[in-house]
Amino acid sequence: MEVATSHTQPTGFIRRYLFSTDHKVIAKQYLSLSLAMALVGGFTSYLIRWQLAWPETNIPGWGPIGPDDYNAIITMHGTVMVFFVAMPFLLGAFGNFLIPLMIGANDMAFPRLNMISFWTLFTASVVLTSSMFVPGGAAAAGWTSYAPLSDNPIYTGVNRGQNLWILAVALEFGSFLMGGINFLTTTLNMRAPGMSLSRLPILVWMEITAAVVFLLSVGPLIAGALMLLMDRTLGTGFFRPDRGGDPLLWEHLFWFFGHPEVYVVALPGFGMMLEIIPVFARKPIFGYRTIIWSTIAAGLLSFIVWAHHMFVSGMDPRLATPFSVTTILISVPFAIIVFAMIASVWRGAIVLSTAMLFALGGLATFLVGGVTGIFLGSATTDIFLHGTYFVVAHFHYTLFPVTFFGGFAGLYYWFPKMFGRMMNEALGKIHFLFTFVCFNAVFIPLFLAGLKGNPRRLYEMSSYDFLKPVQQFHVIATIATIGLLVGQLPLVVNFVYSLVRGKTATANPWQANTLEWTTASPPPHENFRKMPMVYRAPYEYSVPGAPSDWIPQTEPPQPIYPVTAVAD
Amino acid sequence: MLQDLLPTDVSTFGGDIDHVFWLIFWIVGIWFVAAEGVLFYSIIRHRKREGATAMYLPGDTPRQLAWVLIPALVVLCLDLGIDRAGASAWERVKGTPPAGDVVVRINAKQFNWNFTYPGPDGKFGTADDVTTENDLHVPVGKVVRFELQSEDVIHSFFVPNLRLKQDVVPGRTISGWFEATTTGTYEIACSELCGFGHYSMHGNVIVQTPAEYAGWVRDKWPSQTAANSPAAKRN
C-alpha cells in the first residue's frame, strides 16, 4: 500500500516541500497556486473595469488596451477565476488539508496521485499563463469558448493561444479528476473508528458531493475539448458548419459540465460557512441530515438544468419550459440549505470573529445570487436578460460569496491549524469590511446596467445611445473594484505577518468539536499521534446539561448528557 | 419609478415578458427581504453575552424541521406559479410564430447586420431582393417575421425595447417574429461575443407609420414592373 510510504516524513527539501506526498503540504501548494492565480484574476478585473469606465484611456500600470486585447483579458479572467482560483482554493487547498484531518486519517488514500494532481494543475497554470505571451496572444473567445469563434483562427486572429487554452483547461480537468477520486476513496475508506457517515463534518460531505458531481459531468467536456482541438489542428469539423458540424453541440457539451461546475465550486463554499457558523454561534447546525439530503438533491438536479444557458441559443424552443422547471426547482434544495443556515444562527451566542463575519457575509450575499437566478431560470425573462450585465452580476453574486467569502472564512478559521499561528483579528475585520462593502458596490450597479439591456463583453458602450445613461454605473463599479482590490492588502499583510510573527496557536483555539482540532497546530506529519476514536456528531454545542458549551467528537459518552443528537 | 428599471417596451409581447419579470421581482423580493431580515436580526440580537447560552436546536425532529420545510414548500409552490406564468408567455414569444405581414431575412456577419427583403415578388433569392445594412425598416402594428442566418460565428440579435433576443447560429436558419407598437428608432445590439468588433455590431430597428413605410418601400425597392422585366427573370 502506498499509505505506508507517507508515515515517515522525507528529509530532503525536494521530497518534503516540492514533490511531497503529504496532503498538508500539497494543500499549501494548492493554496499558494490559487492565491498567485488570484493575483492574475484580480489584475484582469482591474483592466476590464478600467476600460469600461474610462474607455481607451491609458490604464495606470498597464497602458491602453484594444478590443482584441479586451476579449483576451475577459477570457483569461473567467478561465483563471473559475478553474485556477475557485477550484484549487476550495477543493485543492481546503479539501486536501481537511478531509484526512476531519475524518481521522493519516493522509489521502493515494498520496502519490495527490502529488500528481497538484503538479498537473501546476503544469496547466504554466500553459495557461504562457498562452498570454505567444504570437497572436491569448485565447479571445470567452471562457465559454463558443464555436465557431473558438474553432477557426480566422475569426479571432488567435491560433496558438486558443490551442494552449484548450490544453490548459483539459489538463486542469485531468488534475481535478484525479483529485476527486482521491477525495472519494479517502472519505469512504479511511475514516477513524466511530466516524460513521452521519458523524461526518458537513464540509466533507460537501467536498465529496462536489467531487462526484465533477467526476460525472466533466467527461463529455474533456471529449469536447479534444474535439475542438482536433477541429483546429487536424481538420475535423465537429463544431464547424462549413464542415458539416454543429456549433450548438459545443454549447451542450460545455454547459452539461458548466452548470454542475457551479455546484462543484458552490458546495465546498457552503461547506466552509456551515462548518464555521456553529462554532461561532455555539449551537448545532440546524437540520444536519436535511442539509445533506438537500445537497445530494441539488447535485442530482444540477445535471438536468444545463440548457437554461441556452434558452435563446437556437435550440428547440419546446425544450425551454422543461429546463425552466428543473432550473427553478433547484431553488428548493438551496432554499432549504439557506433557511437551515439562518436557523443555525438563530438564538445562538454569536461571536463575530473574522471567520464568522466572512461566513455570514457569504450567506447574506449569496442570497442575492440565489434570488436573481430565478429571473434567469425563467426562460421568458431570460429572453431579455440573457447575455447582459444582469447575468454577470448574478453569477458574481453566486461565485464570489462561495469562493472568496467562504474561502476567506476558511482561511481565517483554519490558518492556525495550517501554520500554527493565529491571524490578526483587527486586520481581518478591516479586510472583511472592505470586501463586503466594495463587492456589493461593484455588482449592484451592474444589475442595474443589465436591466437596461447592457450586453456583456462589450469593449466599450459608446456605439449605443441607449447605453449612455448606463455609463455612470460602470464608473461606480470600477471605483468599487479598485476599492475591492486595495481592500485585499490587509489580507496580504495579515497573512505574511501572521505566518512569521502571529501568536502561537493552541491545538483548539476556537473550542471546536471536529477532529482536526484534537491534534496539534500544525498537525504532525502523521496527523494524529494516536488513532482518534469518534463517539459523537460533529456539532454538539451548548448541549443542555453539559459541563461546557462544546463536546469534541472524541469525547466518550457520559451519562449526564445525550450521546449524540444525530447518531444512527 | 420601478418601471424605469427596464427600457421602454414597444412590442406586443414585451408586456407578457415584463409581467413575468415583475411577478418574479415581487415574489423573490419579499423572500429576500424576509430572509435577510431574520438573518440580520439574529446576528444583531443574539450576540454572545455573559451568562446567556445558545439555544440547542439541532433541527432533527419534524417539529423543528417544519420551520425550514414549510417555507421551502411555499417556495416550491411559488416556483410552480412562476413556471406556469413563464410557460405561456414563452409559448407566445418563441412558439409557433403568427403569419407575417412583412418577412425579412436577417444576415449576421462580423460585424454587421444585413436585412434582406424579398422585394415586390415576395420571394427570396430573386433579383428584386432588397438588402439594407444595419437598418431594419418595419411598419408599426404589423407582424414582422424574420429568419436569422449567420455567415461566420454565433451572434445574437437583441433589441432591448422589443424584449427580443435570439442567437444567430451559422449553419441554421432560426425564425422568429415581433410586432412593434410604437414608431421610433430602436437600437439592435449583438449580445453574443463574436470577435474584436463585437462591441460595435450595432443596428437600428426603424418602426414607421404604414404611410412612411410605404414611402420607404416606394423609394428603395425596385418597382413591380422592374421585377417582372425579362432582365430580372433571367437572374
Image (cartoon, coloured by chain):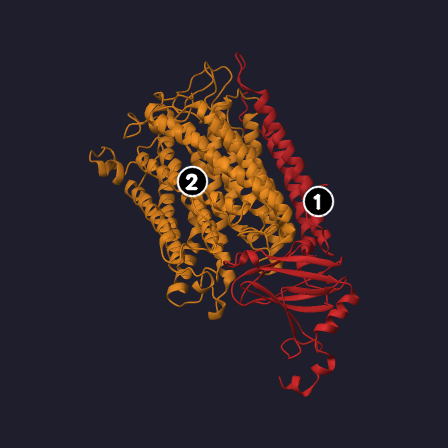
Q: Nearer the viewer, residue A90 or B148?
A: B148
Where A242 falls versus B163 (above or below)?
below
Residue furthest to the front:
A58
Residue located beneath label 1 in the image: B4
Residue at image location 67% in from the left, 42% down from the top = B25
Residue furthest to the bottom:
B230
Mark 1 secondary-structure assignment: helix
Specify the colour of chain B: red
Residue A138 in view in this figure: yes
Where A71 falls versus A189 (above or below)?
below
Where A305 falls versus A281 (above or below)?
below
Q: Position of residue A353 (x, y in %)?
A: 48, 23
Residue A198 in view in this figure: no
Specify the colour of chain A: orange
The disc numbered 1 marks a residue on which chain? B
The disc numbered 2 marks a residue on which chain? A
Q: Nearer the viewer, residue A471 or A269?
A: A471
Q: CA distance from mark 2 to mark 1?
A: 45 Å
Q: Between tags 2 and 1, which lies in front?
A: 1
Q: Is residue A194 left or right of residue B230?
A: left
Q: Which mark is residue A208?
A: 2
